[in-house]
Image: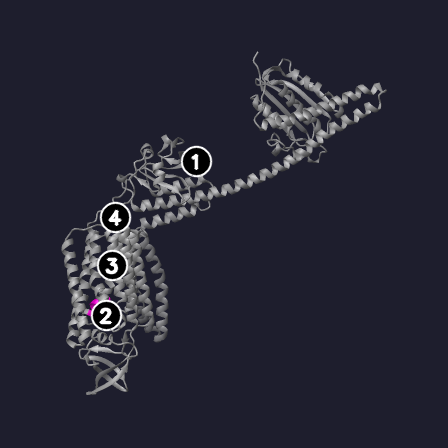
């Protein structure tokens, strides 16, 4: 509650300051300037030409002596663009008075730049504070950003805006920002990345006290000058303002020294990286301001760069400081700084050699051609051709010689991403990543633990060093999964890395030192696990960054592979369903045909009997036909019922001791009518010994009936079927051989599936229902036996039922 109330008050004050900054932008829009170019000497303002007079020296403006830029701005800041002022100037030893109309001091580009940068500083200051509201250094940085925004937006402008004395309020706000912002820099230096006690109290009390004194003195003298319009008060105010500038230089340099000292004494690499971001911001922002603006003005020199450039450089402060506070690992700052310095130095040296090369070539060609213009062109072209390849080779040499380790890490990550982007197998993905990491970071063990959702456990897959745990399963460690972060043994990583030291039973069991989660935002897949480095060194932040980046990429690749597999699986299932629907439609058609044929025969011969009551010679024949067709119909219905039970897993078998030759005889008796009607010749061969097996007699009979039925249906050539029983390797066998159309080799494994019929027989008048062989296969599986088939297209097929025999 306290924090939220504090945040509310801070944001309310921020809003008030933002309104003040808006007033500041308005008051610099109304800042005025002389309508001609000028410069300064010790006696006044030098103007090259005005009113047809040359070498003019302006000594006074509206009665005020003006000898430098500060005095001129203070006098003109009481006016607005379009106002008229009286100037006193000398020319050719004579004194003149004239009036000029003032123009705008700042360009539109400068005003837009100021407005944009003010917004940037305010926005970043608020964001950092809201991200870390309980951290003192975040609050200091917050006010620091607002202080810099005040320096930008409240800089010298028209202080005579009468609306609620807005101009004077803006100038006093500028004094406040100008005096306290460098002290806030120092305070921040003592507070981030960790609190420093060395001369802390002395420096802070001294600096804040001095800021209060300077602010009071500057503001009082400013108000006295505005009210009295006195030359003396003007000089006193400008003297104090020079102290402002000295104050800025002093505390900025002190802050930089504190940061450098913190960098030198910090034992933690993470702190050093944060400090490097800060130092970089100081060098680019306040350092540039002090060196290129404040120091030259203090020494009464001209500014070395335009004010717009200074403002743009100041954006380095909020950007680099915010990165240091919130996300210091955004880039390898040490790499950026050192590489930048090395490149700058070597390229400067190379450029000097380039200029020397042009000079030497010019001298050589001059002595030969004696044509200066041609010489310059030739020299420049030749030097450029030589310079470019030298520069490219130099950059490669620097990368390889000085930055090989980091460069290789980045190159390795790029190579890993490139190598796995087209992988379509999770196992292959893990093998590829395993090999690459194993090449980069030599450890005593490395592997992957994947989550098995169906069994709710972990299992180690691709690995080295985890042999004793390979293919074992482990209970899910909710502590590791819920942490959603890399877990590590603190003794095996560099000091200062913010990695939780999680006490995990799984880590202890495996002897792992680092476990990096493999997960996307929506899904958890497992861990990348590593042991200690074989070199004995600790894992660095670069190691962790690389491993986390690779693990993240592995997770997204697994997600892609799973998505692709699901799409393919769904497509195959749809195709299977379509095929099954076609099979069932064909089955219904076939069953309808099979039912209709015997029913037609039964009906026809029943009518014959009714209409020919006196024809007793045919009566017995007709009754046999009716009986045969009825049995045929019964067998078809039995097949349908059997398959229904099989599909519902309700089929039961009654095992007893049976003899196979007797089964064959019984089957031939049952099929006698069908065999006679088909005109086929049946040859039977039985073993010399009795082949006894434990089996369900009815199920075996139906299986043999189905095989002979198929042989009858598809015997289109030689009208013969051979049925035999024999013993083979302790297996009791029944073999049914036909000489019909045969089966394609690629269909042999499919014909035992329900509703499947051979495509070879598609040209036949009758193709079958696709039930018989499925029932045969289920029966033989239940009897722990085998059903085999050998077939040649156009030569027939041989089906064999093989039962475990009973030893005598």
Q: Which is more N-terminal, label 2 or label 1?
A: 2
Q: Residue at x 20, y 67 (%)?
A: 295
Is residue 6 shown above or below 775?
Answer: below
Percent x, y of residue 799:
64, 25
Magenta-colored span: 292-297
Is any atom of residue 335 visible in this view?
Answer: no
Look at mark 2 in the image and give the residue it sits on.
Answer: 168
Left or right: 776, with 52 as reference point: right
Is any atom of residue 590 visible in this view?
Answer: yes
Residues marked 2 and 4 touching at CB (< 8 Å): no
Look at mark 3 in the image and give the residue it sits on.
Answer: 144
Disc 1 or disc 2, which is closer to the eye? 2
Local packing at callout 2 (Cα closer than 10 Å; few below 14, some 14-19, many 20+) is many
Residue 215 magenta-highlighted: no
Disc 1 or disc 4, which is closer to the eye? 1
Left or right: 370, with 205 as reference point: right
Q: Which is more N-terminal, label 4 or label 3?
A: 3
Q: Marks 3 and 2, how far apart in space?
A: 23 Å
Q: Marks 3 and 1, how far apart in space?
A: 52 Å
Q: Marks 3 and 4, how far apart in space?
A: 26 Å
Is residue 577 shown above or below 404?
Answer: above
Look at mark 1 in the image and give the residue it sits on.
Answer: 453
Asked which quadrant contains residue 492, the reply is top left
Residues marked 1 and 2 touching at CB (< 8 Å): no
Disc 3 or disc 2, which is closer to the eye? 2
Q: Residue at x 78, y 20 (%)?
A: 623
Q: Which is more N-terminal, label 2 or label 3?
A: 3
Look at mark 4 in the image and give the residue it sits on.
Answer: 269
Percent x, y of residue 268:
23, 47
Left or right: 715, with 430 as reference point: right
Is residue 491 shown above or below 604?
Answer: below
Q: Which is more N-terminal, label 4 or label 1?
A: 4
């Amino acid at each position: 509650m306290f924090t939220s109330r504090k945040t509310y008050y801070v944001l309310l004050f921020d809003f008030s300051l933002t309104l003040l900054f808006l007033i500041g932008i308005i008051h610099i829009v109304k800042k005025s300037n002389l309508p001609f170019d000028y410069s300064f000497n010790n006696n006044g303002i030098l103007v090259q030409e005005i009113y047809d007079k040359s070498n003019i020296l302006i000594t006074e403006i509206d009665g005020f002596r003006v000898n430098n830029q500060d005095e001129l701005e203070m006098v003109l800041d009481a006016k607005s663009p379009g106002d008229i002022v009286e100037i006193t100037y000398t020319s050719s030893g004579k004194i003149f008075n004239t009036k000029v109309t003032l123009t705008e001091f700042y360009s539109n580009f400068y005003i837009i730049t100021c407005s944009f940068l003010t917004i940037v500083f305010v926005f970043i200051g608020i964001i950092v504070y809201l991200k870390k509201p309980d951290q003192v250094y975040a609050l200091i940085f917050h006010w620091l950003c607002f202080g810099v925004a005040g320096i930008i937006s409240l800089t010298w402008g028209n202080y005579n805006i009468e609306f609620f004395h807005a101009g004077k309020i803006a100038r006093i706000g500028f004094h406040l920002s100008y005096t306290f912002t460098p002290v806030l820099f120092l305070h921040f230096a003592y507070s981030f990345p960790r609190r420093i006690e060395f001369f802390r109290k002395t420096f802070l009390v001294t600096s804040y006290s001095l800021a209060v004194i300077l602010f009071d003195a500057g503001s009082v003298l400013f108000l006295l000058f505005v009210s009295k319009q006195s030359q003396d008060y003007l000089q006193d105010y400008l003297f104090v303002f020079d102290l402002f500038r000295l104050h800025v230089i002093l505390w900025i340099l002190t802050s930089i020294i504190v940061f450098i000292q913190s960098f030198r004494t910090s034992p933690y690499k993470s702190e050093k990286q944060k400090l490097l971001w800060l130092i970089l911001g100081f060098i680019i922002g306040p350092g540039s301001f002090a060196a290129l603006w404040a120091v030259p003005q203090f020494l009464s020199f001209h500014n070395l760069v335009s004010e717009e450039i200074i403002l743009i450089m100041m954006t380095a402060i909020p950007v680099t400081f915010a990165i240091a506070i919130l996300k210091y690992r955004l880039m390898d700052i040490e790499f950026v700084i050192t590489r930048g310095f090395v490149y700058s130095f070597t390229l400067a040296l190379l450029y000097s050699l380039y200029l020397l090369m042009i000079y030497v070539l010019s001298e050589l060609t001059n002595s030969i051609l004696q044509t200066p213009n041609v010489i310059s062109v030739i020299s420049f072209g030749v030097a450029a051709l030589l310079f470019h390849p030298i520069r490219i080779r130099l950059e490669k040499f620097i990368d390889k010689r000085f930055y090989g380790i980091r460069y290789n890490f980045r190159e390795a990550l790029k190579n890993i991403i490139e190598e796995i982007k087209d992988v379509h197998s999770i196992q292959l993905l893990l093998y590829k990543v395993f090999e690459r990491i194993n090449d980069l970071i030599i450890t005593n063990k490395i592997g992957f633990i994947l989550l098995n959702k169906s069994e709710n456990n972990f299992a180690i897959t691709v690995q080295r060093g985890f042999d004793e745990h390979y293919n074992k399963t482990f209970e899910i460690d909710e502590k590791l999964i819920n942490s959603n972060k890399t877990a590590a043994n603190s003794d095996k990583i560099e000091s200062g890395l913010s990695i939780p030291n999680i006490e995990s039973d799984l880590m202890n069991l495996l002897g792992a030192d680092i476990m990096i989660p493999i997960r996307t935002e929506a899904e958890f897949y497992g861990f990348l696990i590593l042991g200690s480095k074989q070199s004995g060194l600790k894992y660095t932040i670069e190691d962790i960054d690389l491993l986390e980046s690779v693990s993240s990429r592995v997770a997204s690749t697994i997600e892609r592979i799973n998505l692709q597999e699901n799409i393919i699986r769904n497509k195959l299932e749809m195709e299977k369903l379509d095929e099954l629907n076609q099979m069932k439609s064909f089955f219904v058609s076939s069953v309808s045909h099979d039912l209709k044929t015997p029913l037609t025969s039964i009906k026809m011969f029943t009518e014959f009997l009714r209409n020919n009551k006196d024809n007793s010679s045919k009566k017995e024949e007709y009754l046999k036909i009716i009986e045969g067709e009825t049995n045929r119909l019964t067998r078809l219905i039995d097949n349908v019922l059997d398959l229904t039970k099989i599909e519902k897993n309700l089929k039961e078998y009654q095992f007893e001791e049976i003899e196979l030759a007797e089964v064959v005889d019984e089957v031939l008796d049952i099929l006698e009518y069908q065999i006679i009607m088909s005109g086929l010749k049946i040859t039977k061969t039985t073993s010399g010994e009795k082949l006894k097996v434990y089996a369900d007699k009815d199920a075996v009979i139906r299986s043999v009936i189905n095989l002979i039925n198929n042989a009858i249906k598809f015997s289109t050539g030689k009208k013969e079927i051979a049925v035999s029983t024999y013993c083979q390797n302790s297996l009791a066998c029944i073999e049914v051989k036909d000489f019909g159309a045969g089966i394609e080799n690629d269909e042999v494994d499919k014909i035992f599936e329900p509703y499947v019929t051979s495509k070879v027989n598609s040209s036949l008048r009758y193709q079958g229902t696709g039930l018989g062989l499925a029932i045969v296969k289920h029966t033989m599986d239940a009897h722990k036996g085998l059903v085999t088939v050998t077939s040649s297209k156009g030569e027939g097929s041989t089906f064999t039922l093989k039962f475990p025999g009973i030893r005598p």
